[in-house]
Image: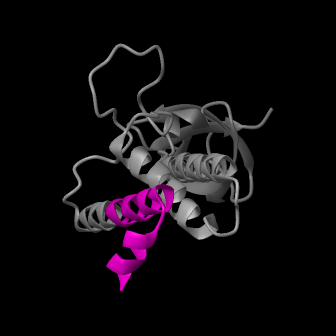
Amino acid sequence: MTMEFLAQADVLLKSFWYLALGVSVLFIIQTVMTFIGADSGDGIEPDFDGDLDMDTHGPSQVFSLRNLINFLIGFSWTGVAFYDVISNKYILVVLAAMVGSAFVAFFFWLMKQMNQLNQDNTTKVETAIGRMATVYLTIPNNGKGKVHIVLGGGTREYDAVSTEGDLATGTLVKVVEVLDGHTLVVSKKN
């Protein structure tokens, strides 16, 4: 029945259908390969060697197989869906191209959102120097206590030593140095 329908269809509708079915199969294969890890790339590297004056790292890479498939999915299925609704075939092709471009733009946006999840949110203790902290566990003279300090958007707890003798719980202090990468040297707030 499907073959009879396509045999009777006009060339543009046949083109939309064949393109939609072929690209859909490629899209499904690409998606399955991505989920099982057989896809070695993230789809944003160029599929050719060329000297372009543009950033080829990240979602701004326009010329990739994944983007071509995204464009053709939107283009072909829009053509199939609106073929009987839009009588002017030039307007139909322009609409299909706009929807295909929207699919690629959506992919860029999605990749940008995913790249934001990939940020390094580790806190570097050296950024504590010069900041204020609160003594959490008393810091004895020549001994270690603990302080709370806000770093990287969250409250962190670090071992601390004092340059000024005993510091009681609740005392506001300033970080003046970091020892061995995790112990803060503090002094009373002036």
Is 81 or 87 nearer to us in this picture?
A: 87
Residue 35 makes an appearance in the image: yes
Residue 75 position in % (x across, y down): 53, 54
Q: In this view, does 141 lie to the left or right of 11?
A: right
Write the start and end of the magenta stretch as one range: 1-24
Residue at x-position 41% and y-position 31% = 57
Residue 5 forms part of the magenta stretch? yes
Q: Furthest-right residue in view?
A: 190
Q: In this view, does 10 lie to the left or right of 134?
A: left
Residue 131 position in % (x across, y down): 69, 36
Is 178 or 116 nearer to us in this picture?
A: 116
Residue at x-position 64% and y-position 55% = 154
Residue 144 position in % (x across, y down): 49, 51
Is 76 or 85 nearer to us in this picture?
A: 85
Residue 18 forms part of the magenta stretch? yes
Quarter of the rendering occupied by the C terminus: top right
Q: Is the magenta stretch mostly helix, strand or loop?
A: helix
Q: Is residue 118 left or right of residue 127?
A: left
* 59 up-or-down from 16: above or below: above
* 182 up-or-down from 23: above or below: above
Residue at x-position 60% and y-position 53% = 96
Residue 178 position in % (x across, y down): 49, 34
Is 89 or 180 nearer to us in this picture?
A: 89
Q: Furthest-front residue in view?
A: 8
Residue 146 makes an appearance in the image: no
Quarter of the rendering occupied by the N terminus: bottom left
* 57 up-or-down from 33: above or below: above
Colour convention = one colour
